Image (spheres, rainbow, N blue to C red):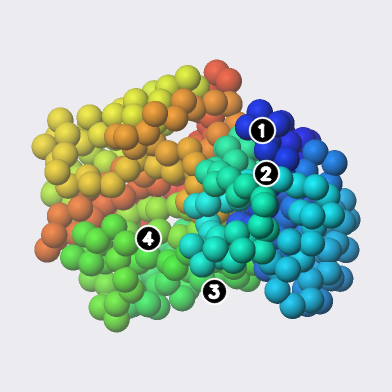
Amino acid sequence: MRVQKLRKQLKEQGLEAILVTRPENQRYLSGFTGGEAALLITAELKLILTDSRYYQQVAEEAPDFALVQVEGKASAALSRLVKEHGIHTLGFESTHVSFDQYQEWKKACRGVRLVPLQDAVERLRLIKDQGELAKMKKAIAVSDAALDHIRQTLRVGMTEKEVAWELESFMRTHGAESLSFDIIAGSGPNGAKPHAVLQDRPIQKGEPIVLDLGATVDGYHSDVTRTICLGKPDKKLQEIYDIVLRAQLAAEEGARVGMTGQEIDALARNVIREAGYGEQFGHSLGHGVGLAVHEGPRASPLSTTVFEPGMLCTIEPGIYIPGWGGIRIEDIVLFKKDQVVVLTQARKDLQAR
């Protein structure tokens, strides 16, 4: 079904074939997880080009694709295939191909028109099927459990690096095959950086701690952020936290199928702006999650994407104040025909326990 949808796109664009090189897209279309390969798809053919390291893996993971054994340069195998099958127009994933690689293909495939395509497979990946949603829910459950765990184990004096290791160890021993990205544990002033780098700084009582983490299960990623503090928060921390939470809930409760990414972003951004912190919310509200931890659709001030049933998106407003700290709260939500369902179930209490 996925390949058929891609073939329909090729036909509409007058292309005879497409070369798929992005690893996530290869996995989506064929099941192959090795990454170091290329799929060549035409109206009749489903080929996977790779070297001897992956022959057995292709047979196990992508039995619907015919294996083309590559010995030497892959471009030489591609040159042979386009001639053998009379391919004159070949699409390629221009966003994920270097200029040098393009030049190599161009030289190897003389007489073939190479057509740059953007997001041909990514457009298919926007809508998650039931199998994908089941994997996403498993990944989300692992990161939810990790956050519950850290609330019980977090102690004053632990460093950010120690907190991150505690989270990583828990996820890897409770169902995660890997981390989705490097864990963020931004405490105090370090939390004012949305992508804070872990420090040896000891965590102190009463300060905000931004925890951003994700687990990978069956190739699918989760992405969740909670901000917590040890001990009772002061008035300023509680006030700013409540603003961010109101903004998130406004987006989660107000978002619907048919709205654009701009409109969904505005639901949360307006709350923060009206509270006087508009300048302190600099990033987009959210992004899609799936085989890549950051993918479409986007909820941002510039996004014209119209949300459809089956799409996933993070809702993650934040306020960041240099020298003080940051607050971010992030869930993954699923757009259904008549409602938006919050898949992330981790607690949203500001106090750790």
Pointer 4 with pointer 3, Cβ within 8 A? no
Q: How many marks?
A: 4
Residue picked out by circle 3: 169
Q: Quadrant of residue 101?
A: bottom right
Residue type indicated by callout 1: Gly
Q: Secondary structure at mark 3?
A: helix
Residue picked out by circle 4: 211
- Specify which label sits upstream in the sequence, 2 or 4: 2
Identify the residue at image location x=23%, y=71%. Answer: 204
Mark pair 1, 3: CA separation: 50 Å
x and y percentages locating residue 351 in the rendered image: 32, 54
Mark pair 4, 3: CA separation: 15 Å
Residue 318 can be seen, yes or no? yes
Pointer 1 with pointer 4, Cβ within 8 A? no
Q: Secondary structure at mark 1?
A: loop
Residue type indicated by callout 4: Leu
Q: Secondary structure at mark 4?
A: strand
Identify the residue at image location x=66%, y=57%. Answer: 110
Q: Secondary structure at mark 2?
A: strand
- Specify which label sits upstream in the sequence, 2 or 3: 2
Pointer 2 with pointer 1, Cβ within 8 A? yes
Residue type indicated by callout 2: Thr
Badge 3: how crowded within 10 Å, few (<14), some, or many (20+)? few
Q: Quadrant of residue 300?
A: top left
Which label is found at residue 14? Answer: 1
- Specify which label sits upstream in the sequence, 2 or 1: 1
Residue 230 can be seen, yes or no? no
Q: Nearer the viewer, mark 1 or mark 3?
A: 1
Mark pair 2, 1: CA separation: 8 Å
Residue picked out by circle 2: 89
